[in-house]
Structures are given as structure tokens and as C-alpha cells.
């Protein structure tokens, strides 16, 4: 049995749905705050939007819509793209 599987199985599925929903809302809230900050905040906005979308993928895993492998792939791609976009925006600020 993989490490952590016993702990994972102790909690009901609804706990994971709530965790991912809160993380989704937090990511979108922070993206909105970055948008409101103006030019200096816009560098971080793509990262938070894509983080929120990756959390949506994990929420859909726990509701039975996505397979976890697909959600994991989406999460990695979204976070990498978000980091690249954020880094490009910060580089342009020099």
C-alpha cells in the first residue's frame, strides 16, 4: 500500500471536495486581487488563475468526473504555464 493511502481513506470524500473548493476560491480571489493591484500585480495573476483551474481539476476528480491521472497532468501543465507567464511578466518589468 502506498504511503498515506490509509490516512487518505480515513477521511470522507466530502472533506477533499471542500479542501479543493476552498483552494479554488482562494486562487481566484488572489487573481482578482492581483488584477486590482495594477501593473505590479498582473505578473502574478496568470499563476493564480491557473492554480485555481488546477484545483478545479482535483475537485472534479473527487466528484467522479475526471480520472486522477488526468487531473494531475492538468495541474502540472497549468502550474508550469502559470509560472512561465509570471516569470515573463516579471522579466519585462526591468
Image (cartoon, rainbow, N blue to C red):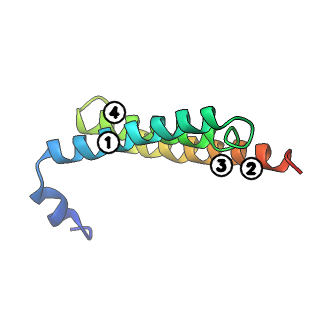
The crowding category of the residue bearing disc 2, from other C-alpha atoms within 10 Å (few below 14, some 14 to 19, many at least 20), is some
Closer to us: 2 or 84: 84
Q: Distance between the residues labelled 3 and 2?
A: 6 Å
Q: Residue furthest top?
A: 65
Q: Name the residue under label 3.
A: 83
- 71 vs 44, left or right, is left
Q: Distance between the residues labelled 2 and 4?
A: 30 Å
Q: Mark 2 points at which residue?
A: 87
Q: Which residue is drawn at 29% across and 28% down?
A: 65
The secondary structure type at the circle numbered 3 is helix
Check whether the beta carbons of the residues at disc 4 and disc 1 lie within 8 A of each other.
Answer: no
**x and y, in percent, of residue 72 in the image:** 43, 46
Q: Name the residue under label 4.
A: 66
Q: Name the residue under label 1.
A: 22
Check whether the beta carbons of the residues at disc 2 and disc 4 lie within 8 A of each other.
Answer: no
Q: Distance between the residues labelled 4 and 1?
A: 19 Å
Q: Earlier in the sequence, mark 4 or mark 1?
A: 1
Q: Which residue is drawn at 75% across and 37% down?
A: 39
Q: Distance between the residues labelled 1 and 3?
A: 21 Å
Q: Which of marks 1 and 2 is nearer the N terminus?
A: 1
The crowding category of the residue bearing disc 3, from other C-alpha atoms within 10 Å (few below 14, some 14 to 19, many at least 20), is some
The secondary structure type at the circle numbered 1 is helix
- Quarter holding residue 26: top left
Q: Which residue lies furthest to the bottom in this view?
A: 3
Circle nearer the viewer, 3 or 4: 3
Amino acid at each position: 500500500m502506498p504511503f498515506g493511502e490509509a490516512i487518505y481513506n480515513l477521511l470522507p470524500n466530502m472533506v477533499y471536495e471542500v479542501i479543493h473548493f476552498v483552494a479554488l476560491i482562494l486562487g481566484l480571489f488572489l487573481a482578482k486581487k492581483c488584477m486590482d493591484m495594477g501593473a505590479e500585480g498582473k505578473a502574478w495573476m496568470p499563476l493564480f488563475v491557473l492554480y485555481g483551474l488546477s484545483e478545479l481539476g482535483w475537485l472534479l476528480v473527487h466528484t467522479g468526473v475526471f480520472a486522477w491521472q488526468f487531473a494531475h497532468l492538468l495541474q502540472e501543465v497549468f502550474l508550469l504555464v502559470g509560472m512561465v507567464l509570471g516569470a515573463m511578466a516579471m522579466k519585462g518589468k526591468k
